[in-house]
Amino acid sequence: MRTERRDIIKDGILTQWLLTSYSARKLGLKSTGHAGGIHNWRIAGQGLSFEQMLKEMGTGLVVTELMGQGRECHYR
């Protein structure tokens, strides 16, 4: 599967899963070609502090770590 731009999270909403052929088969879904891991993550902010984002978010999920991708996540 070819590399392409994907919006995984858009406006704070998860828009698609990251599935290897194994995980897709288990879920009865189509693979998204992520067996080799995720490359070139780009996380765009809106200039809010972490505390402001939490307050504006209300109810939601905050991801602080990813396991299994062999990548470090740095943000500014």
Image: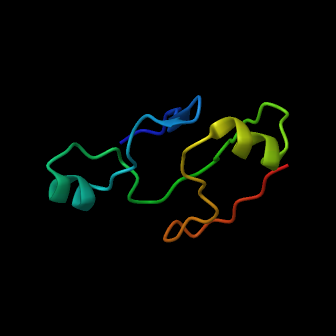
- Position of 11 with respect to 73 (left or right) is left
Can you tell which quarter of the image residue 46 is in?
Answer: top right
Can you tell which quarter of the image residue 74 is in?
Answer: bottom right
Whole-percent x and y of residue 56?
Answer: 70, 35
**Count of marks overlaid on the render:** 0
Whole-percent x and y of residue 3?
Answer: 48, 39
Where 30 sits versus 24, above or below? above
Instruction: Say which residue appears at 80% left-offset and 41% top-offset.
Output: 52
Where 14 sits versus 10, above or below? below
Whole-percent x and y of residue 71?
Answer: 62, 65
- Position of 7 with respect to 41 (left or right) is left
Viewer-closest of 21 and 46: 46
Instruction: Say which residue appears at 55% left-offset and 44% top-offset.
Output: 59
- Position of 2 with respect to 39 (left or right) is left
Whole-percent x and y of residue 29?
Answer: 19, 45
Q: Which quadrant would the N terminus be assigned to in this image?
A: top left
Can you tell which quarter of the image residue 25 is in?
Answer: bottom left
Instruction: Say which residue appears at 40% left-offset and 49% top-offset.
Output: 18
- Position of 58 with respect to 36 (left or right) is right
Where 23 sits versus 11, above or below? below
Q: How did the renderer colour the structure?
A: rainbow
Where 64 sits versus 3, above or below? below
Instruction: Say which residue appears at 64% left-offset and 47% top-offset.
Output: 40
